[in-house]
Image (cartoon, rainbow, N blue to C red):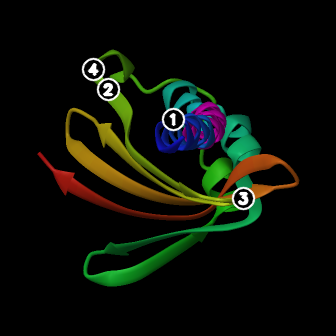
Amino acid sequence: MLRRLLFVGAVVATALGANAFRSESADEAAIRAAIEHYFQGHATGDGNHFRVVFHPEAKLFAIRDGKFWQLSSADYAARANGKPPADEASRKRWIEEIDVTGDAAMVKIILDYPGVKLTDYMSMLRVDGKWMIVNKIFQGVPK
């Protein structure tokens, strides 16, 4: 009887663990799809990709020349010139890490460009069922 209870307990625990993993994987896939818009905005110069993934109230922050710097997501998207960068073929972008808790996520992104390596930390929220960037902090290191 004890063996049967242990077996049933193991099956239930495995099923619960598998469901939790599926849920996390679905969230990660949705987050990756959202971040792909961010990547495409950089790759194409099309600010509409940024508008899709950044919440309208989102802000971007950094330390530039030793001073606190910020920009609205609307101003960030408006800076896109509609053209791919001349050195696009040599630029690399990837997601380094995704950490999800319910409707909140933190995504670490690397943008490895010929002259600079940028690290972005995106705070994301699931807003009305859609993953959106609500805050971005970043650091660039010249090569």
Q: Position of residue 2 (x, y in %)?
A: 49, 44
Query: Residue 41, can we see it?
Result: no
Closer to us: mark 1 or mark 2?
1
Determine whether 65 is above or below 1 in the image: below
Q: Is residue 79 left or right of residue 126?
A: left
Q: Amino acid at mark 1?
A: Phe
Q: Position of residue 50 (x, y in %)?
A: 66, 43
Q: Tell me if mark 3 has few (under 14), some (14-19) or many (20+) residues whose alpha carbon lies within 10 angstroms of its own.
A: some
Question: How far separated are the C-alphas under marks 1 and 4?
Answer: 54 Å
Q: Which residue matches tag 4?
A: 90
Q: Report the residue at 32% width, 53% height from top.
A: 119
Main SS of residues in magenta: helix
Could you tell which of marks 1 and 2 lies nearer the N-terminus?
1
Question: How far separated are the C-alphas under marks 2 and 4?
Answer: 4 Å
Name the image quarter holding residue 64. bottom left
Q: Report the residue at 33% width, 43% height from top.
A: 110
The residue nearer to you, when weighing 41 against 80, is 41
Name the image quarter holding residue 24. top right
Rendered image: mark on residue 74: 3
Question: How far separated are the C-alphas under marks 3 and 2?
Answer: 24 Å
Question: How far separated are the C-alphas under marks 1 and 2?
Answer: 52 Å
Name the image quarter holding residue 67. bottom left
Q: Which residues are magenta?
A: 17-35
Q: Is residue 38 left or right of residue 138?
A: right
Q: Position of residue 124 (x, y in %)?
A: 62, 58
Q: Quadrant of the N terminus?
A: top right
Q: Report the residue at 30% width, 50% height from top.
A: 118
Is residue 30 on the magenta stretch? yes
Q: Amino acid at mark 4?
A: Ser
